[in-house]
Amino acid sequence: MKILLLEDEIMLNESICEYLDAVGHQMHSFLDGLDALESIKENSYDLLILDINVPGIDGLSFLEQLHKLKIHVPSIYISALVDIEDISRAYNLGCYDYLKKPFHLKELTLRIDRVKVDKETPRVHLRLSANYSYDQEHSLLLFNNEPQVLTKKQSQIIDLLARNRGMVVDFEQFRIYVWDENIIDNATIRAEINRLKKFLQEDVLVNVRGMGYMIDKP
């Protein structure tokens, strides 16, 4: 796999690269978040391994920027942070896994192998409800396997929620992904989601009061 590593501890960075190179991965490593961000704009990667506290731009903001750029790559966080808010934010941003430092490098390879298996499994439609599903490859909402016509913003809302099934998507994530970080109040976001809810023939979108919205895993 072609892997981007963002880790500012030089010795750990070198150790991870040496180990993963030895087992057949192609490593591109960075100490600074801004340098990593420039690289991913110009290159495609199969996996991101991200520390959180790094110079330039932190690992969590890094993934937020990728959402804004509509770049979706599986990511594994490696961090000494154990704050539940940081961990929750990482998973809300769609990270695949979270590995607490210190860790054995063999454990990291096991997590990577799990990502590899998932990537090699043919994509299937995500089941959203009894009759709704989501075609990730073509970004299509289907009702009884029939494509549904949505506005651009409605399609982006469904895409964000479908790819994060079972997790709450907060208003800031909607602002970043759907409204390109424009200054939009929560009421405007709610109004757009309510229009989408009225269009849907099943109660797919769940309002989590005070937090945001989600699609439950059926």
Image (spheres, rainbow, N blue to C red):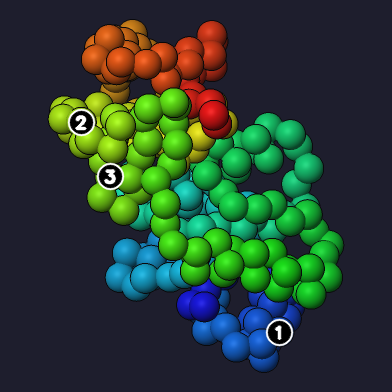
Residue 116 sits in quarter = bottom right
Q: Residue at x 44, y 26 (%)?
A: 130
Judged left or right of residue 94, residue 139 is left
Q: Which residue is mark 1?
A: 19
Cα–Cα span, label 1 and label 2: 47 Å
Instruction: Report helix, strand or loop for mark 2.
Output: loop
* Mark 1 crowd level (few <14, some 14–19, many ≥20, 10 Å Cα): some
Residue 185 visible to an observer of this rendering: no
Instruction: Report helix, strand or loop for mark 3.
Output: loop
Name above or below for residue 207 compared with residue 123: above
Cα–Cα span, label 3 and label 1: 37 Å
Q: Residue at x 52, y 84 (%)?
A: 26
Image coords of residue 181 (percent x, y): 31, 33
Q: Amino acid at mark 2?
A: Gln
Q: Amino acid at mark 3?
A: Ser
Q: What's the mark number on residue 139?
A: 3
Please identify the residue farthest to the bottom as the structure is shown.
22
Image coords of residue 74 (percent x, y): 51, 58
